[in-house]
């Protein structure tokens, strides 16, 4: 009886709280369709369907100024119905905190077509979030996208923080425009943060279906606008009606981590990334990724031995590119390892002997046009959703190795690729695979009832299930690929200012590593290496270094000096057996105590990794003593 009474009291209190919140929220709309939304946290005003004014009541900051217009429109058959050009044909009030503006136009050229754009604006009673959703209707189909505008931002008042290209900030960048696509490496998470001096406003989506979205940034003079869009599933010709996801906006007090943490918690709970507790412990220790174009590096005996003297092998991952008999970018999906003049198996065994981890390169979607399997999988080839052209590598170039990109929604393609990659793993016991083109998701028609995003997720999942304990790395990163990947390469771009937003969102799950331009320290202009290191620190990313030949490790080249710095950061000294950061008589004693022992329990006493502790190991340690 007491529990029932307590429950009743709780319900009454909860209802009182909701009523109090509702009374603090107001939403008004005038005859011209201009909407004013106000809560305890913000004041927002829409003019002509565009969000033109935003005031943060928590910090007493206003982030907008002037009259720089954004864009709210629906595009069908290449033509747009924009709210700035029309007064709403109808205004509906669904509740005190929700209204719907309906815009309509009749197109007589190039075809008879009635188009309608519905703009729904509301306030979430529980969270106070400003809600924006759109619905588009075209009698003859052809809907390509729907966007809404958040405009009139002041450069002086706000910085834009975006999980794009590894994490970027647009700060007072005038006369600049760009478009970011989701899901893709350009827009990694469906979140945008507008940071003022004491707080800001965020825009995010709770979409768990990975609908295709765009963020458009346009700057002019002292102001800028950001347009948020969604694309229906291709083919667009058949799309007569589309309802977008609900976008959520709210004000906050503090720095950008406030909304970022909120979105990260949502990602974990709603998208359900794979449990990382079954991943091998070595992945958490990786501090450096070294890329090997295999044909060069393996031909020069001693390169791994020399590298092991500069950096800690147990903290270094070897990313091996040219390891297939066919050669780089040729004859996909043939994953037969090279054995003709350089032996991949010998390379893996030697790398493991020193303590390195090995990650060969795999093209996750590649099938060469010259490979017999292209005839099987051509029907699943990705295509441009607008013009229908097939997508792949070097398809329009007169090059020697064009290959197609195949939609992983095809179960037939996934089964083939998993079997071939698993065969390599079972034979050579490599530690990881780099899945190239893993981030590339195109708006194509479903296959076997699956979208490309769903096929991408399934392929990652099936690879991990087929190879328990394998580490998957990928090119780029976003809310699709982070579910199963543990490593992700940064995109090769230097636009905008680096920011930690993406590493904050994804670092509990994925280790990012670089490349910024050409990853050869000895071939970069003076100061470039230091500049790149600073960006990696912002991104919390590991450095990617490429070795071509053993001479890259000579003491008089920049690569050698850089690796020495890496070793110091790792607190690594070659010959340091007890791990105290110095080589001294204690290390010599430990080696001496194991003389004559083959395959010792403590592998560190076998300094030269020849499988036995002997006088050679003692000599090496003695030579390293300061």
Image: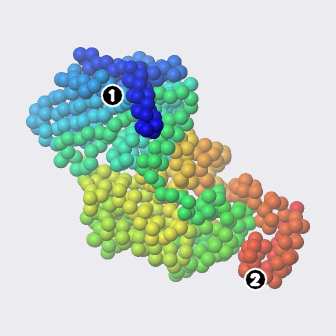
Q: Quadrant of residue 186?
A: top left
**Residue 95 position in % (x across, y down):** 28, 25
Q: In the rendered view, does 7 fall on the left or right side of 449?
A: right
Asked whether residue 145 is in view, the answer is yes
Query: Callout 2: 10 Å neighbours few (<14), some, many (20+)?
Result: some
Q: Could you say whether the residue bearing mark 2 is in a helix, strand or loop?
A: loop
Which quarter of the picture shows residue 31?
top left
Secondary structure state at the residue bearing disc 1: strand
Image: 446 above or below 191: below
- The residue mark sitting in front, 2 or 1, is 1
Tell me the tag on residue 122: 1
Q: Where is residue 187 in the image (x, y as percent from the top left)?
A: 43, 44
As drawn, is 584 to the left or to the right of 500?
Answer: right
Q: Rounded to the nearest whole Å, what is the CA distance between mark 2 and mark 1?
A: 73 Å
Question: From the image, which quarter does the N terminus lie in?
Answer: top left
Q: Indicate the quadrant where residue 29 lies.
A: top left
Quick one: label 1, few (<14), some, or many (20+) residues within 10 Å? many
Task: Please determine whether, in this image, residue 545 is positioned above or below residue 39.
Answer: below
Q: Is residue 44 above or below residue 389?
A: above
Q: Residue at x 52, y 51 (%)?
A: 490
CB within 8 Å, label 2 to label 1: no
The residue located at (44%, 28%) in the rendering is 13
Question: Residue at (82%, 72%) from the top-left corner?
Answer: 620
Q: Which residue lies furthest to the front in this view?
A: 1
**Whole-percent x and y of residue 213?**
35, 42
> What's the residue at 39%, 70% (across, down)?
417
Residue 162 seen from this side: no
Q: Where is residue 366 in the image (x, y as percent from the top left)?
A: 38, 65
Which sits earlier in the primary sequence, circle 2 or circle 1? 1
According to the picture, the residue beneath numbered tag 2 turns out to be 598
């Amino acid at each position: 009886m007491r529990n029932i009474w307590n429950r009743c009291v709780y319900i009454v209190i909860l209802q009182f709280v909701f009523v109090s919140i509702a009374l603090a929220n107001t939403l008004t709309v005038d005859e011209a369709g201009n909407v004013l939304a106000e809560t305890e946290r913000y004041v927002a005003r829409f003019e002509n369907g565009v969000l033109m004014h935003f005031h943060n009541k928590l910090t007493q900051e206003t982030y907008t100024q002037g009259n720089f217009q954004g864009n709210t429109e629906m595009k069908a058959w290449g033509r747009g119905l924009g709210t700035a050009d029309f007064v709403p044909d109808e205004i509906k009030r669904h509740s005190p905190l929700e209204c719907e503006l309906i815009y309509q136009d009749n197109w007589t050229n190039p075809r008879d077509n009635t188009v309608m754009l519905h703009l729904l604006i509301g306030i979430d009673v529980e969270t106070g979030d400003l809600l924006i959703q759109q619905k588009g209707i075209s009698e003859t189909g052809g809907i390509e996208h729907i966007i809404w505008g958040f405009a009139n931002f002041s450069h002086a008042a706000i910085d834009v923080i975006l999980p794009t290209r590894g994490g970027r900030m647009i700060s007072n960048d005038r006369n600049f425009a760009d478009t970011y696509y989701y899901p893709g490496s350009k827009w990694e998470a469906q979140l945008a943060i507008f940071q003022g001096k004491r707080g800001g406003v965020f825009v995010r989506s709770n979409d768990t279906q990975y609908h295709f979205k765009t963020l458009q940034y346009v700057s002019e003079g002292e102001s800028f606008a950001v347009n948020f869009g969604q694309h229906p599933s291709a083919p667009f010709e058949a799309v007569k009606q589309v309802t977008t996801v609900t976008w959520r906006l709210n004000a906050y007090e503090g720095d950008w981590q406030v909304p970022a943490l909120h979105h990260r918690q949502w990602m974990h709970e709603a998208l359900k990334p794979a449990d990382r507790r079954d991943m091998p412990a070595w992945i958490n220790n990786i501090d450096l990724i070294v890329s090997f174009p295999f044909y060069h590096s393996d031909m020069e005996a001693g390169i791994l031995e020399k590298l092991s003297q500069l950096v800690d092998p147990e903290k270094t991952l070897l990313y091996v590119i040219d390891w297939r008999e066919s050669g780089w970018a040729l004859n996909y999906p043939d994953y037969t390892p090279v054995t003709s003049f350089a032996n991949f198996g010998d390379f893996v065994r030697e790398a493991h002997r020193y303590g390195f981890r090995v990650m060969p390169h795999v093209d996750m979607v590649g099938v060469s046009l010259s490979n017999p399997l292209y005839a099987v999988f051509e029907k699943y080839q990705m295509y441009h959703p607008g013009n229908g052209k097939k997508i792949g590598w070097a398809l329009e170039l007169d090059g020697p190795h064009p290959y197609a990109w195949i939609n992983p929604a095809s179960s037939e393609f996934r089964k083939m690729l998993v079997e071939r990659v698993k065969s390599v793993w079972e034979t050579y016991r490599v530690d990881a695979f780099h899945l190239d083109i893993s981030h590339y998701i195109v708006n194509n028609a479903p296959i076997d009832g699956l979208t490309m995003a769903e096929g991408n997720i399934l392929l990652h999942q099936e690879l991990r299930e087929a190879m328990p304990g394998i580490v998957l790395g990928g090119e780029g990163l976003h809310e699709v690929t982070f579910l199963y990947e543990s490593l992700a390469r940064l995109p090769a771009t230097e636009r905008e200012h680096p920011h930690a937003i993406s590493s904050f969102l994804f670092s509990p799950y994925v280790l990012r590593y670089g490349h910024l331009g050409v990853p050869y320290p000895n071939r970069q202009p003076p100061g470039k290496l230091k500049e790149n290191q600073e960006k990696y620190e912002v991104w919390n990313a590991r450095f990617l270094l490429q070795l071509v030949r053993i001479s890259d490790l000579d003491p008089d080249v920049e690569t050698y000096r850089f690796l020495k710095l890496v070793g110091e950061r790792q607190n690594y000294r070659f010959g340091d057996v007890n791990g105290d950061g110095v080589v001294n008589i204690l290390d010599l004693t430990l080696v001496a105590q194991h003389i004559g022992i083959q395959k010792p329990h403590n592998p560190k006493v076998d300094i030269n990794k020849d499988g036995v502790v002997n006088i050679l190991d003692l000599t090496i340690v003695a030579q390293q003593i300061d």
